[in-house]
Image (cartoon, rainbow, N blue to C red):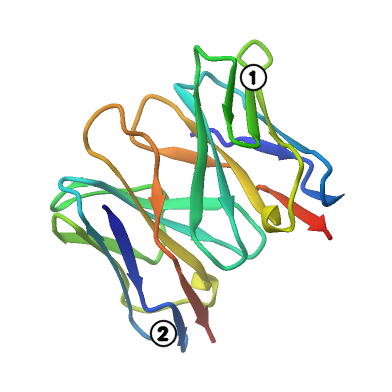
Amino acid sequence: SQQGEEDPQALSIQEGENATMNCSYKTSINNLQWYRQNSGRGLVHLILIRSNEREKHSGRLRVTLDTSKKSSSLLITASRAADTASYFCALRSNDYKLSFGAGTTVTVRA
Amino acid sequence: SQTIHQWPATLVQPVGSPLSLECTVEGTSNPNLYWYRQAAGRGLQLLFYSVGIGQISSEVPQNLSASRPQDRQFILSSKKLLLSDSGFYLCAWTSGLGGQETQYFGPGTRLLVL
């Protein structure tokens, strides 16, 4: 199964700034999901976007999906220190499984 | 509400020793269950998944095995650990019903094989 590729690998921003990370993939998907992982913890689901959707919002999060370019972006607006974490995109094809990328590590400086 | 437990939280084992990691889910029935391994600073590698009792699918050939003796219990085992088995092991569940596709993760077990 395919994996998403996140870009950049790491991102350091000042508190209050926006953070944008991207995920690219190669074959068709059923949906794409974003997860957050705080250091040494399990993953927490953030948002799911289906293949027929183009944009979704959840609080300070905005996710876009461009199926023609096979890419998605996650935007965190007005970042906070608590947003410091690794962010993963996960691809769902037509089976029970999710394929995770290597993640983007975000550091928010106070 | 649903909760997922993993234990132990941390484990240090010598090479060649056996392994048993346990994952249990509460508050749901017939979940799909997953075992992942995460190397330091890396993404998640799916090891096994199960859609029902006694039904195990293996994703990669390895030194590990999985079992599902009860509906909400998923066990990861090894008869003889290798150094390369070190990592962070995560259990996750998703509803077995259609339309629920979010995966819910346990807190993880950090395994160090020496």
- Residue at the image point whose x is 84% and y is 60% from the top: A110
Check disc 2: other Cα within 10 Å, few if <14, some if 14-19, many if 20+. some
Q: Amino acid at mark 2?
A: Gly
Residue at (63% x, 65% y) in the render: B40
Residue A59 on image: x %, y % = 59, 36
Q: Quadrant of the C terminus of chain B?
A: bottom right
Q: Nearer the viewer, mark 1 or mark 2?
A: 1
Dot label at residue B44: none
Say yes or no: labels 1 and 2 on the same chain: no
Q: Amino acid at mark 1?
A: Lys
Determine whether B45 is above or below B84 in the image.
above
For this rendering, which residue is in front, A86 or B13? A86
The chain letter under disc 2 is B
Q: Is residue A30 left or right of residue B56?
A: right
In which chain is the residue bearing label 1? Answer: A
Q: Which residue is mark 2?
A: B16
Q: Nearer the viewer, residue B31 or B18?
A: B31
Where residue B107 appears, x then y in whole percent? 44, 65
- Give residue A70's mark: 1
